[in-house]
Image (cartoon, helix red, strand yellow):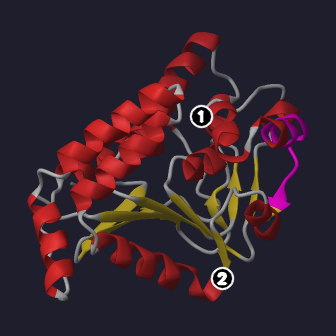
Amino acid sequence: MTYEVIQLTKDNGVASLTLSRPPMNPLNSKVFEELSLAADELQADASVKAVTITGAGSKAFAAGADIAEMANLTPVEVYSFNQVSRNAFEKIDNLSKPVIAAINGFALGGGCELALCCDFRLASDTAKLGLPEVGLGIIPGGGGTQRLPRLIGTAKAKELIFLGDIFDAAAAEKIGLVNKVIGADLLMEEAQKLARKLASKPLVAMSMAKSAINTGINMDMNSALTFENKSFVTAFTTEDRKEGIGAFMEKRKPSFTGK
């Protein structure tokens, strides 16, 4: 498929998605529509085992929603806009493949919320993150009020959202918002390295582990453990389980097929 405001490439099991509205890569309805379509494509493509997301250029991952597009919208139009963004973010969040955000600059507002939809967040040492919406008289509308507290806890999430401060990658790593801070010149190399490592793992097991974590966190402990147990039993029926245990017993490198 041909995209206009994103770029999507695939190489040896790894898909690389780039937001392409430089220099700041703002998120408008067209970006959200194409993110949604790309998520559908990635989910359907069995050859894709891992995904990276970044922004074009060196200034921004995504510096938030396109305020120029939103400024004069009516409440009804804002609702429709927000449904489009929610649909795109939920599809990325629910991808059965691991997703890595390579945060190469500003990740503000919707850009930060997009990163929150990913399983891993690697940030360059020049990255800046934040949810400044309250200062504009609105609130985060792309899942920030829900995904952020689940990641870093409610107290810290309230601090970041209420104050709207913009903070650097080191501060983000300290509170668990990003997994690792990397030199800007090495960010994409490290993101691809992690993606290739993930792509070498058994995809069915990884998908089930992702589902167990993301689903279980919203359940009571007993229900979550039951969900985990069912997923474990299902994983035990796969060809990859046979290959993984067989390779371990035979002291050889496994060759997983994703079945």
Residue 2 in sight in this render: no
| Amino acid type at image mark 2 | Ala
Image position of 248 (left or right of 172): left
Q: Which residue is mark 1?
A: 142
Q: Residue lying farthest top?
A: 76
Q: Which residue is mark 2?
A: 184
- When the figure is inspected, residue 28 is found, relative to residue 127, above or below; the finding is above
Q: Nearer the viewer, residue 70 or 210?
A: 210
Q: Could you say whether the residue bearing mark 1 is in a helix, strand or loop? A: loop
Q: Could you say whether the residue bearing mark 2 is in a helix, strand or loop? A: helix
Disc with the residue nearer the chain's start (1 vs 2): 1
- The magenta stretch spans residue 162: yes
Q: Nearer the viewer, residue 195 or 132?
A: 195
- When the figure is inspected, residue 227 is found, relative to residue 199, above or below; the finding is above
Q: Which quadrant holds the N terminus?
A: bottom left
Residues at marks 1 and 2, CA–CA distance in whole angstroms: 27 Å
Give the label on residue 81, or none. none
Q: Residue at coordinates 50% horizontally, 27% vertically from top-left?
A: 219
Q: Which quadrant holds the C terminus?
A: bottom left
- The magenta stretch spans residue 161: yes
Residue 149, image x and y in percent? 70, 38
